[in-house]
């Protein structure tokens, strides 16, 4: 494990996982406040580190992505009373709604707007934003002004936050996993109960057959306009990893190989078996013929479908929401690893006027349970309640919600929801043990692709994936002609250039592991 970690650190320091680079962005070289510390009333000791002067009240601005809860004003007011007392600052949280984030989030960093902090992630292309100068370098700022957070962050997470030898984001300290599988309902309103277990793709089909025969008012399998996740599930169950480490990818590799080579669906020998299976599912009516035009992503949640494929956190949320429905979850991924800690991250904008105070705030949020609760959950007995086990429940989901700054979560401060299933904890603990004994996929956890040199071709391949693969995988188009057309369109979109670029990055990464 030490060898693996050293290799990951080297990869990050040399920019292996993100090969093309531009000049440094931001100023993380200690040009922050160096005045002698002023003892503002209630200011934490951590905030005083590095000679931070908190005598002047400042207002910090943070951006998150989600729909703003109706009751957020009261939550913000309550939080700011604490922040004024402990750090002599206030926080304004700006929300970018889901409907607008694809356009508004990139513009946030090109507009020149002055703000301090923002949620970022692999799925928001943080590495490209960092290279384009959107984020400050944190080499000196992070350990100086958020020392407790820095000390608690693993070396692996720090490596993942590094580009060309510089730190650009502060990753979450909450462990998440690549485990993926079916979430399925076992108890129904008519009193019927499904008593068998899903353990593989075959038993999954047995379950869907049972639903079709016994619960005709339910769709057996949830599919909507974002595409089916069964193709990802199939590939993961075969032991493969996606090149970008996320769903809806089109390039995969086998982590068991000494020198993994990228391949796509039409090059995989097992693709016909998968397409045959899905063609059968389509014929049996497991999902609607118009599934790809259905925008409803809550079919299982609202009792319209019986099964969906996702992660353990989605399972826990459904179990809590409907404890009488008997939801179960099983991981069908062959090799489980940690998701990159940068999957949820916080970045300091290069336009920030108070980066030191912003990091001191982050230190406070991630180490002080009282402040964390006020930030993430809201107002005790107003927006949320706690039971005798310390588990939380949002009082009115139409008015309140947990924070959308998911990067703030830590294993120590984060709370389970009231009614969290017992196996939520046991499965996570088991994956930790599995990762210790089998690092087949874990050693690739820090590998992040950089599409800077192939932005046009990569976007074109993604478009082909949606237009041609999604209907093909669901059995809506003829298997033989559809697969041939998919290949032709991918080649025309530039998949070979994409593959060559990402293969070079993967080869360079693998070299650091030896």
Image: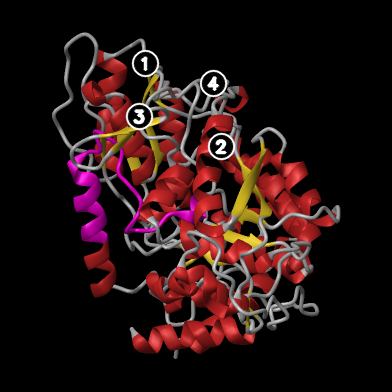
Residue 427 falls inside the magenta stretch? yes
The answer for how far apart the CA atoms under marks 1 and 2 are is 44 Å
Q: Earlier in the sequence, mark 3 or mark 2?
A: 2
Q: Earlier in the sequence, mark 3 or mark 4?
A: 4
Quadrant housing the C terminus:
bottom left
Q: Which residue is mark 4?
A: 289
Question: Label 4: few (<14), some or many (≥20) within 10 Å?
Answer: some
Q: Which residue is mark 3?
A: 381
Q: Position of residue 302 (x, y in %)?
A: 41, 19
The answer for how far apart the CA atoms under marks 3 and 2 are is 15 Å
Image quadrant assignment for residue 289: top right
Front label number (1 vs 2):
2
**Residue under the point 40% across and 27% down:** 382
Label 4 element class: loop
441 or 121: nearer the viewer: 121
Residue 51 appearing in the image: yes
Question: Label 2: few (<14), some or many (≥20) within 10 Å?
Answer: some
Question: Which portion, as a residue range, is magenta?
Answer: 406-431
Front label number (3 vs 1):
3
Left or right for 189, reference 102: left
């Amino acid at each position: 494990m030490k060898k693996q970690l050293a290799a990951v650190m080297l990869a990050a320091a040399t920019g292996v996982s993100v090969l093309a680079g531009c000049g440094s962005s931001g100023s993380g070289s200690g040009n922050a406040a160096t005045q002698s510390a002023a003892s503002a009333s209630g200011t934490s000791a951590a905030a005083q580190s590095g000679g931070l002067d908190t005598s002047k009240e400042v207002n910090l601005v943070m951006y998150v992505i989600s729909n703003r809860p109706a009751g957020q004003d009261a939550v913000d007011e309550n939080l700011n009373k604490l922040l004024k007392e402990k750090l002599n600052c206030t926080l304004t949280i700006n929300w970018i709604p889901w409907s607008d984030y694809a356009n508004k989030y990139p513009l946030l960093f090109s507009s020149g707007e002055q703000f301090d902090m923002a949620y970022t992630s692999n799925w928001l292309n943080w590495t490209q934003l960092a290279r384009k100068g959107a984020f400050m370098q944190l080499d000196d700022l992070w350990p100086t002004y958020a020392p407790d957070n820095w000390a608690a962050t693993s070396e692996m997470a720090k490596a993942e936050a590094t580009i060309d030898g510089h730190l650009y984001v502060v990753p979450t300290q909450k462990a998440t996993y690549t485990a993926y599988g079916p979430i399925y309902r076992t108890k129904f309103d008519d009193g019927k109960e499904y008593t068998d277990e899903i353990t593989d793709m075959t038993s999954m089909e047995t379950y869907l057959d049972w639903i079709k025969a016994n619960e005709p008012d339910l769709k057996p399998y949830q599919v909507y306009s974002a595409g089916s996740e069964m193709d990802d599930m199939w590939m993961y169950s075969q032991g493969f990893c996606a090149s970008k480490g996320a769903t809806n990818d089109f390039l995969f590799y086998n982590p068991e190989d000494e020198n993994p080579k990228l391949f796509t669906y039409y090059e995989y020998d097992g693709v016909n078996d998968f397409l045959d299976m899905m063609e059968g599912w389509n014929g049996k009516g497991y999902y609607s013929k118009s599934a790809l035009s259905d925008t409803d992503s809550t079919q299982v949640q609202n009792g319209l479908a019986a099964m969906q494929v996702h992660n353990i956190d989605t399972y826990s949320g459904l179990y809590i929401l409907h404890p009488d429905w008997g939801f179960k979850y099983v991981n069908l991924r062959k090799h489980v690893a940690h998701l990159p800690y940068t999957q949820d991250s916080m970045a300091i904008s290069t336009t920030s006027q108070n980066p030191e105070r912003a990091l001191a705030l982050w230190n406070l949020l991630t180490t002080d349970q009282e402040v964390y609760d006020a930030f993430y959950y809201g107002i005790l007995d107003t927006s949320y309640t706690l039971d005798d086990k310390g588990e939380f429940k949002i009082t009115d989901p139409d008015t309140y919600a947990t924070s959308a700054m998911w990067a703030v979560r830590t294993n120590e401060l984060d709370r389970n929801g009231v009614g969290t299933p017992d196996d939520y904890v046991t499965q996570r603990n088991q994956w930790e043990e599995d990762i210790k004994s089998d690092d087949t996929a874990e050693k690739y956890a820090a590998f992040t692709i950089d599409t800077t040199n192939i932005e046009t071709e990569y976007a074109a391949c993604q478009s082909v994936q949606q237009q041609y693969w999604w209907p093909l995988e669901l059995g809506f188009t003829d298997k033989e002609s559809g697969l041939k057309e998919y290949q032709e369109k991918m080649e025309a979109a530039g998949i070979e250039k994409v593959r060559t670029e990402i293969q070079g990055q993967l080869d360079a990464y693998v070299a650091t592991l030896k």
